[in-house]
Each structure stands twice: as structure tokens, then as C-alpha cells.
Amino acid sequence: MAKGNLAACLPVTLAYEGGWADHPKDPGGATMKGVTLAVYRKYRPGASKADLRAISDKEIQSIYRDGYWTPVRGDDLPYGVDLVVFDFGVNSGPSRTAKYLQSVAGVAQDGKIGSGTVKAVKGMVGKTIIQKFCAKRLGFVQGLSTFKVFGKGWSRRIADVEAKAVAMWLRHATTAEPDRQREILNGEAEQASKTAKQQGKTGGTAAGGGAVVSGGDAALNGAGWVAAAVLVAAVAIAVVVLVKARQNKQRAEAYATAAAAV
């Protein structure tokens, strides 16, 4: 159980939530450290933009605790698991993050983390939960229409949070000595790097193969539309594989950084 771990998890999330923002085209309006003016006014009625910009660390922690940490049962989840569930909850809401955790734990997905979910989670290996959960989170953001624009940053955040969460779990929930913790984290980095390299080669081969096939089809039977379809399919496959390669490269970098910090 990671009771009182919000103080360690919140800085990880805030590093990605940014500072002050007040873009006229942003539907969320003025925002400071991920807190919108509308949300802040629920805690401090009548607050101005200037008040929001000067929001205290105590207020920030209180808002995140009440709005996200408590709803996802952060104090009752294992170290590291609390981080990934909380961070996704901040991005996509407590209900969605609860359903994803319940899916990984193999319990009914009602969007509310109760005693049954907590018990199931505690019966699993924390590292397994963290990695499966982050894989599902990555799959979710890849399905969003804005992934092409923001995907690289989103996947980097997910990789970083995953690695930090595994390191947190190793540090608090296991008896592994620091040297063993580094060994495990570096092992994850090496595996992710190896996978990224394999995917990079596969993606390059798929794209190159599509070009060769398209040229051959056109030359042999003149069926240009067939050649074009083959090329488009090959390029689409290559893009997907190369995106996965980039994501695993990000995971490798994140785990290597986490290992160095032990």
C-alpha cells in the first residue's frame, strides 16, 4: 500500500502538465499546472486569472488529491501502480483509468475502484500491472484523432511514467537491493532497445518492399491501381511499425534514465 505517496507522484505528473497557459483558442481557458480557472473557482470562488497564476503548491496538491488521487484510491494501491493510475486519471478522467486498471486486474469494469479491485491488484506483481496498464493507455491515445499531432509527446510521457513507476515499485515494494534494481531497469531498457531496432528494420523493409512490388506490377501487367494499392498498404504497415519502434526507443531511454537515478 502506498499511503501518502501523492507527494512523490504529483511532481511526475506536473512535469507534463506545464505552467501558465491562456491561449484564446484553448477551450479550457486559462490553466496553471493543469488546473483550469473553472476548477480553481470551485475551491476558491471568484478567483481571477491572476489568482490562478499565483496558485500555491498546497492548493495544487489539494485539488489533485480531491479530484484525482482520492477517486482512484491512490492511498490503497501499490507503489508505482498508484503513479500510472493517477497520471492517466489526470489526463483522461478517474472513471476511464479505473476501467483500465480493472481490465488489467481481470475484474468487472464499472469505473469505480472498490475493495474488489484493490484486492485483485494487490494479488498481482506490480511491475506486470504497470506495464500492461501503460500498454493499454498507449493503445487508447493511439486511437485518438489528434495522435498524429501530439502522439510523440504522449508516448514519451507514458514511457517516462512507466519507467518511473517500475522504479518506484522496485524501491518500495520489493526487497531488491539498489544494484539489482538497476539491473532490472537496465534489462527493460535493453529489451525495449532491441525491440525498437527490430521494428525499425521491419518497417524499413515493408516500405522498401512495397515500392519494389509496385514497380514490378506496373511493368508486368500495367495494373497501376493494383501497384498503387500494394504500395499504400506497404507504406501504412511501415508507418505503424516505425511508430512502434519510436515508442520502444522512448521506453528504452526512459528505463535507462530511471536506472541511472537509482
Image: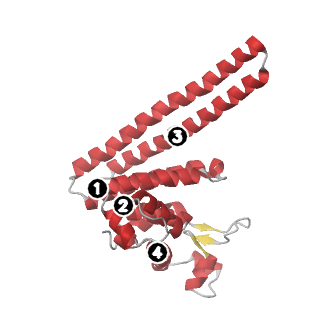
Cα separation, mark 1 vs mark 3, equals 26 Å
Task: Decide which of 256, 239 is in the foreground and name it.
Answer: 239
Q: Which residue is mark 1?
A: 170
Q: Secondary structure at mark 1?
A: helix
Rendered view: 10 above or below 67: above
Q: Which residue is mark 3?
A: 244
Q: Are marks 2 and 3 in contact (CB under 8 Å)?
A: no
Instruction: Name the quarter where the N terminus is drawn.
Output: bottom left
Rendered view: 56 above or below 151: below
Mark found first going from the N terminus, 4 or 3: 4
Q: Are marks 1 and 2 in contact (CB under 8 Å)?
A: yes
Rendered view: 210 above or below 135: above
Task: Decide which of 114, 152 is in the foreground and name it.
Answer: 114
Q: Secondary structure at mark 3?
A: helix
Percent across and percent down for residue 204 are 57, 27
Type of residue at label 1?
Answer: Leu
Cα separation, mark 1 vs mark 2, equals 8 Å
> In the drawing, does residue 230 fall left or right of residue 15?
right
Task: Decide which of 194, 232 is in the foreground and name it.
Answer: 232
Q: Which residue is mark 4?
A: 71
Type of residue at label 3?
Answer: Lys
Type of residue at label 4?
Answer: Pro
Q: Which residue is mark 2?
A: 80
Rendered view: 135 above or below 56: above
Rendered residue at 56%/66% (across/down): 19
